[in-house]
């Protein structure tokens, strides 16, 4: 089982990602994903810096969305990053966060179809087909086959993961929703795959309170999770439409830390694993069939401890 790192450093600098990348490789992590957030420094430029300072670590956006960059640009970015790092590149795809709708004003109603289109384009260009089928013009940079990870909480995005992902990421999914999410992915994979293999490899990234500052960081991340969870979960937590809209506005305008105050206790208890005992977490990982564990990093000083914890889980 692999161990991955999802960066949650706030607006990281080039020096931040260099330190994170070196620490991740030194700690024995298998891969590192950087967020593609348009409020911050460009993800692909930061990933190029990660490629320069590492030798073994698999790297990629965690995650990019199919709206804010044209798929042609995403394909070119992947090929360019492969120039620096070889076959270590993966691509994380998702519907995009609430900012895509709230700040950029883009509807995400067709996200599952868009994710499938980007995945199909990456695979077809890597197989030697044209980048632009209408003109027949090809990408003038060599593109190798790339592993595609699809992340999501909404059913349609989970279905896209089952159809098109080499891997499916369950990141900060409520405990009460894990079995449902795994079932949606499995059913979609069984209905028909456009990706190799019978089903995607399941990557679980639980939101864990390890004590100290990690509890506050976990609560901040929960604000995103709440908005992207199913209606049945909102009802379970006592969140109606106006409450969700208030949370969404505050998240877009002020950020996750400020929006946390709008998240009810019932949601936090469902989203955050309060007992970090690796043996207990391993039981859940085995039950849902997770093949990899990913950990968020909010502080550069936590890398070694979080990777060690994840290794105990997968052991």
Image: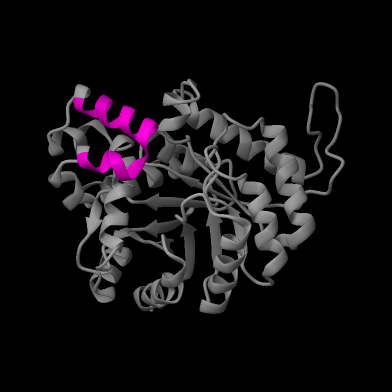
Front position in the image: 152 or 252: 252
- Quadrant housing residue 211: bottom left
Foreground of the two, 110 or 299: 299
> Which residue is depicted at the point 79% across and 28% down?
132
Q: Is residue 21 left or right of residue 99?
A: right
Numbered range of the magenta stretch: 243-261
Residue at left offset 46%, top offset 51%: 10
Q: Is residue 260 magenta?
A: yes
- Left or right relative to 24: residue 121: right
Query: Vertically, is 171 above or below 252?
Result: below
Residue 126, horizontal then vertical, whole percent: 75, 46
Please determine whether, in this image, residue 191 is positioned above or below residue 205. Answer: above
Q: Residue drawn at (26%, 76%), measured in percent from left and top?
A: 279
The vertical placement of 50 against 79, above or below, is below
Q: Where is the C terminus found, in terms of image quarters?
A: bottom left
**Magenta region's main secondary structure?**
helix
Q: Residue at x 62, y 36 (%)?
A: 118
Residue 302, quarter of picture: bottom left
- Quarter occupied by residue 156: top left
Counting the numbered discs, the total is: 0
In-image side of 125 versus 251 (left or right): right
Where residue 116 sits in the image (x, y, percent)? 56, 35
Horizontal side of 234 relative to 308 (left or right) equals: left
Q: Is residue 273 visible?
A: yes
Residue 283 on the magenta segment = no
């Amino acid at each position: 089982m692999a161990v991955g790192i999802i960066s949650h450093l706030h607006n990281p600098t080039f020096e931040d990602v260099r330190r994170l990348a070196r620490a991740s490789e030194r700690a024995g992590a298998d891969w590192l994903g950087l967020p593609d957030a348009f409020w911050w420094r460009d993800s692909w430029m930061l990933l190029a810096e990660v490629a320069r300072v590492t030798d073994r670590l698999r790297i990629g956006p965690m995650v990019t969305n199919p709206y804010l960059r044209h798929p042609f640009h995403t394909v070119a970015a992947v090929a360019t990053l492969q120039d620096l790092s070889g076959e270590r590149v993966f691509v994380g795809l998702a519907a995009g966060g609430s900012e895509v709708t709230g700040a950029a004003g883009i509807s995400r109603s067709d996200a599952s179809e868009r994710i499938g289109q980007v995945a199909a384009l990456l695979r077809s260009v890597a197989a030697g087909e044209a980048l632009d089928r209408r003109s027949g013009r090809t990408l003038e940079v060599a593109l190798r086959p790339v592993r595609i990870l699809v992340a999501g909480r909404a059913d349609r995005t989970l279905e896209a993961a089952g159809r098109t992902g080499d891997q499916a990421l369950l990141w900060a999914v409520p405990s009460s929703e894990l079995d449902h999410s795994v079932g949606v992915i499995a059913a979609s994979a069984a209905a028909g795959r456009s990706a190799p293999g019978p089903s995607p490899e399941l990557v679980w990234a639980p939101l864990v309170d390890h004590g100290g500052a990690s509890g506050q960081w976990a609560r901040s991340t929960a604000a995103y999770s709440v908005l992207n969870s199913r209606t049945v979960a909102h009802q379970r937590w006592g969140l109606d439409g106006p409450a969700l809209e208030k949370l969404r506005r505050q998240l877009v305008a002020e950020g996750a830390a400020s929006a946390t105050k709008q998240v009810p206790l019932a949601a936090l208890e469902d989203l955050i694993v309060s007992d970090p005992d690796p043996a207990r977490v391993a039981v859940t990982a085995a039950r849902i069939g997770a093949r990899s564990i990913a950990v968020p990093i909010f502080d550069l000083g936590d890398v070694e401890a979080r990777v060690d914890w994840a290794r105990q889980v997968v052991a």
